[in-house]
Each structure stands twice: as C-alpha cells, then as structure tokens.
Image (spheres, rainbow, N blue to C red):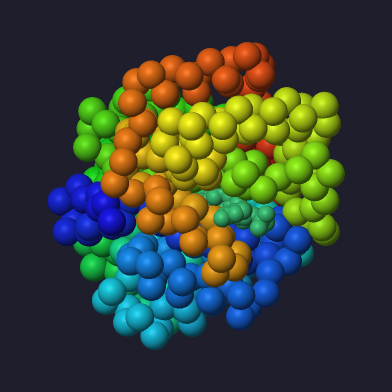
C-alpha cells in the first residue's frame, strides 16, 4: 500500500480512498445498504484507511452507512473525509457555505457518522453568495475546537484558495481529475503542489467510464447522473469508449494491467496524492492492489495523451455536476 501525508496533521492516508457518493443512492439510481456496507468493509479489509462521504450524498444516507460500516473496524483505524456547504430542500440542492450552515452541518454529520470528530472536513463547493473569508473562518474555528483534524476545499479555483488561506490553514483540495477531465492541470494542481496542499482527486474512473465494463448499450436506471453526463450520450459516448478500448490495450500490452488499474495509477502518477474511487458493492475494489507499487513511464503517458487527442479532440468536462447557487432572495430565507 502507498500512503500520503496530509500536511502537518499526522494523517497518513492510503493513496486510494473509498468514495461513497453512489452509496447514498441519490443521482446514482438508488443503492443497497448491505452491499454498500460490504463495499466499504471490503476496502478496509484490503488495507485502505480513508473513506470520503458528504451530507448531500443521499441526503444523509451515505454518512449513516459509512458510520455503520466503519464501526466494526474501530473509529481510530479509519480516516473520515466529509464535507459541508450544500443544502437540500424538497429534493433540490443549492450551495450554502455560510458560517452558520457549516457549523450546523458538522454537528449533523457527527451524529450520522456516530463520531465526535472528522478527520478531513471539506467545503464542498464555493458559494458565490458567501465571502470565502466567512467560510474559512468557520472551518478554522472547528479546527481550533478539535472537532476536525484537517481543512479541505473542493471545486475551488486558485483565487478562492488564496483568499481562504489568509483566514485558515488549508490541508487538502478535492478537485475532479482523471484521464478524460484534466482541467486542474493548468493551475489548481501546480498551486496545490507548490503550497503543500494534498490533492484528493475525485472521479478517478470518470464515473465508471474508465472501469472497462462500459458498453455502447449501457443503461442507467432512475436518476443516475450518467443519463445527463454528456460523455455518456451518443455519438460522444462511442468516441470515449473507443479511447477506453485503446487505453485498455496499452495497459495490457505495456503493463499487463487493466484499464481501471491504469486510470487510477495515472491520477496518482500525475501528482494527485490520493485517488477517490467510488464504489457501491464489494467486488468493485478487487483490483486495488493492482494500482499500487508501479508507475507509468513518460512514453506511456505520451501514448495516453495521443489516444485522447486522436479520439476526443474536444473533451467534455465535469461541469454538468455543479450544484446551483441560491438566488439572493433565497439566501435571505435559507
Ligand atoms: P468514480 O470513482 O469515477 O466512479 C465510480 C463508479 O464507477 C462507481 O459508482 C461504479 O459505478 C463504477 N465502478 C467503480 N469500481 C468499478 C469496478 N471495479 N468495475 C466496474 N465499475 C466500477 O466516480 P465518483 O464516485 O463520482 O467519484 C469518486 C468519489 O469522489 C465519490 O464517491 C465521492 O466520494 C467523491 N466525489 C466528490 C465530489 C466533490 O464535488 N467533492 C464530486 C464527485 C465525487 P456503477 O456500479 O454504478 O456502474
């Protein structure tokens, strides 16, 4: 297993983190509790020691399942990464990173997770209606009270991180990053590297596209976000699948690996400290060991770039997932 140190917090996390968005069911066509618990426990049994969740994942359900799943392992043996800053009401969500909301969300999360502290606490999305300084101040007060051990932000740009760091220490950043979604390479990734902010990259498998199991006739049930993800719509889906086929061949011939192992390894070798790998059943983490203990060489990285450029000259980003902001009128009420 490989580990990443999270700043000066003493947290030594495995470089693969168990992601639990799908486990909440919402935006993933539902979930099964016993399979979800088994998935998290399978990951812990394989030696992973960090689980990422959020209040909004299933409107509390993901955090509750994480709380149940880690109980047997012992709270002190698992790092919990969770978040604050997305509110929900009648099934719709909107950003709210006000000081009051952050503090309320932490106490709700602690109850659902059955714990009295969170290891890494992220601001889930920047809120254009709340000054970054207010959000940072709330996070800092939770750190000073010992209720959280590390502060993170997610989906923040460099300017927002700069402002945040004037008010509070920043230990982690959680951006989207995978072979197909590389927006952070321009400035977020170099900024984090330069400033000692650990990068916990989400969507390492591009929502399963890089798992190797996707076929052109894939069907996604209910509210599964892949029904709206531009990459999963034809004819673009076909082009992405062709790229995945070529990546799979590269992984097989050069490294005797699967495309899934290649995709996770790529994220780690590009400079992410930790790759978040979303799961919903215990079989999905079977290849964890195969992502550790090797590296892609420069030739392979160039060949990967070439596959992407040939097949997907105009890549689609993950922007379709961004939650809405409140209107100024709504902000007066919620
Ligand atoms: P992901 O890791 O790229 O993909 C997860 C999906 O891939 C799974 O739900 C599963 O989908 C499929 N999968 C996983 N392992 C597989 C395997 N071995 N074989 C076949 N398919 C497999 O996407 P993600 O879950 O969106 O991102 C990872 C984690 O990052 C999340 O769970 C969450 O903790 C975090 N995240 C954070 C943010 C943020 O804004 N901070 C945003 C997104 C995600 P199916 O079984 O449904 O096909």
Residue appearing at x 83%, y 31% in the figure: 234
Q: Identify the residue at horizontal 42%, vertical 56% (top origin).
A: 288
Q: Is residue 78 left or right of residue 235?
A: left
Vertical placement of residue 3 versus 230, above or below: below
Residue 202 visible (yes or no)? yes
Residue 74 as seen in the image, left or right of residue 154: left
Question: Could you tell me which residue is drawn at 32 percent across and 82 percent down?
Answer: 74
Q: Is residue 240 visible?
A: no
In the rendering, at what x and y percent does residue 237 appear?
76, 32
Q: Count the marks.
A: 0
Depth check, front residue: 239 or 182: 239
The residue nearer to you, when weighing 99 against 61, is 61
Left/right of residue 312 with respect to residue 226 in the rendered view: left
- Measuring from the top left, give residue 86's x and y in whole percent: 57, 54
**Looking at the image, residue 159 lies above or below residue 169:** above
Which quarter of the image is occupied by the N terminus? bottom left
Q: Quadrant of the C terminus?
A: bottom right
* Identity of the residue furthest to the bottom in this view: 72
Residue occupying the point 33% across, 49% down: 292
* Image height of 87 relative to 255, above or below: below
Image coords of residue 326 (percent x, y): 66, 45
Depth order, front residue of 198/253: 253
Task: Give the quarter of the image for residue 164.
Answer: top left
Residue 82, quarter of picture: bottom left
Residue 205 % position (x, y): 55, 44
């Amino acid at each position: 297993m490989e580990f990443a140190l999270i700043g000066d917090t003493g947290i030594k996390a495995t470089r693969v983190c168990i992601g639990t968005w799908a486990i909440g069911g919402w935006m993933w066509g539902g979930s099964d509790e016993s399979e979800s618990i088994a998935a998290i426990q399978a990951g812990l049994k394989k030696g992973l020691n960090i689980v990422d969740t959020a209040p909004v994942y299933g409107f509390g359900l993901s955090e509750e399942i994480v709380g149940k799943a880690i109980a047997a392992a012992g709270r002190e043996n698992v790092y919990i990464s969770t978040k604050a800053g997305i509110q929900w009401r009648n099934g719709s969500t909107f950003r709210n990173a006000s000081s009051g909301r952050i503090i309320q969300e932490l106490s709700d999360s602690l109850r659902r997770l059955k714990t009295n502290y969170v290891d890494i606490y992220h601001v889930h999305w920047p809120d254009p209606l709340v000054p970054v300084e207010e959000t940072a101040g709330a996070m800092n007060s939770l750190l000073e009270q010992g209720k959280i051990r590390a502060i993170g932000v997610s989906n923040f740009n460099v300017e927002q991180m700069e402002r945040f760091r004037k008010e509070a220490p920043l230990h982690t950043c959680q951006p989207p990053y995978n072979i197909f979604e590389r927006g952070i390479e321009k400035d977020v990734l170099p900024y984090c590297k330069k400033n000692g902010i650990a990068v916990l990259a989400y969507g390492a498998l591009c929502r399963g596209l890089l798992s190797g199991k996707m076929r052109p006739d894939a069907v996604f049930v209910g509210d599964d976000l892949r029904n709206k993800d531009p990459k999963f719509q034809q004819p673009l889906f076909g082009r992405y699948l062709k790229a995945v086929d070529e990546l799979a061949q590269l992984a097989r011939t050069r490294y005797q690996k699967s495309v899934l192992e290649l995709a996770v390894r790529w994220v780690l070798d590009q400079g992410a400290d930790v790759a978040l790998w979303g799961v919903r059943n215990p079989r999905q983490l079977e290849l964890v060991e195969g992502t550790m203990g090797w590296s892609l060489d420069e030739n392979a990285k160039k060949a990967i770039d070439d596959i992407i450029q040939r097949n997907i000259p105009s890549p689609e980003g993950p922007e379709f997932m961004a939650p809405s902001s409140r209107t100024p009128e709504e902000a007066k009420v919620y």
